[in-house]
Image: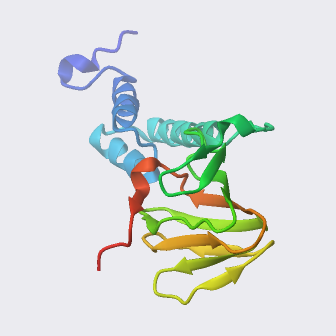
Amino acid sequence: MTDNSHRRGHPPRGQALRQAIGWLSAEGRHDPVAVEEACRRFDLSPVDEEFLIAESRRVMRDSARAATPHSELVRPGEEDERLTSEGVRILESWNVPRDPEVSIARARLLPGETTRWHYLVDTVERYLVVSGSGTVELGDRSPEAVGPGDVVVIPSETAQRIRCDGPEELVFYCVCTPRFQPSSYRDGKPPG
């Protein structure tokens, strides 16, 4: 039996479902609100709606899996350490587009060195001090001494600088969420 429903102004069987899938893909959305809109927009049958819901869940699940980092061991080379304009030696330990949620960098200051005042936009930073001693300044807070094991939490748009006070270099890890991007870095203190 031939389906001639398209001659009466209805799309051929399955055509509405294909259009709905195409629309969701073009929108880049497979969330429940978008699926509900696609079902209405393309007037899907209950069977096609069930299929679209299941397919959208699969797409979202697969996307989440693809975004999850795979197990791996990363050993940054010391030769990749660089002196930044802010006055600190940085070795990017982990900062990759496939893991947009976090970046990790080792930072080093020699005795007597201080970073310039700076802040990050739309990024929370944490310092995990590994060795040495220093003083951290955050926003309007009084300077505070830091040493091995200390964690310093720095909200987005908070002015910061850190100084190495001891006879040994100050080594700490910078953990940024989301991952650090040069476009989020600002010199000085935030306006206001």
Say which of 51 and 162 sits in front: 162
> Which quadrant of the structure image shows residue 42?
top left
Residue at (34%, 32%) from the top-left corner?
26
Q: Is residue 87 above or below residue 11?
A: below
Residue 102 visible, this orientation: no
Residue 10's quadrant in the figure? top left
Q: How is this picture coloured?
A: rainbow
Q: Position of residue 1 (x, y in %)?
A: 40, 9
Q: Residue at x 37, y 22 (%)?
A: 13
Q: Position of residue 172 (x, y in %)?
A: 71, 62
Name above or below for residue 86 compared with residue 61. Answer: below
Residue that lies at the very extreme toward the top in this rendered image: 1
Task: Identify whether 105 is placed above or below 30.
Answer: below
Is 42 left, or right, of 45 in this rendering? left
Q: Is residue 170 visible?
A: yes
Percent position (x, y) of residue 48?
45, 35
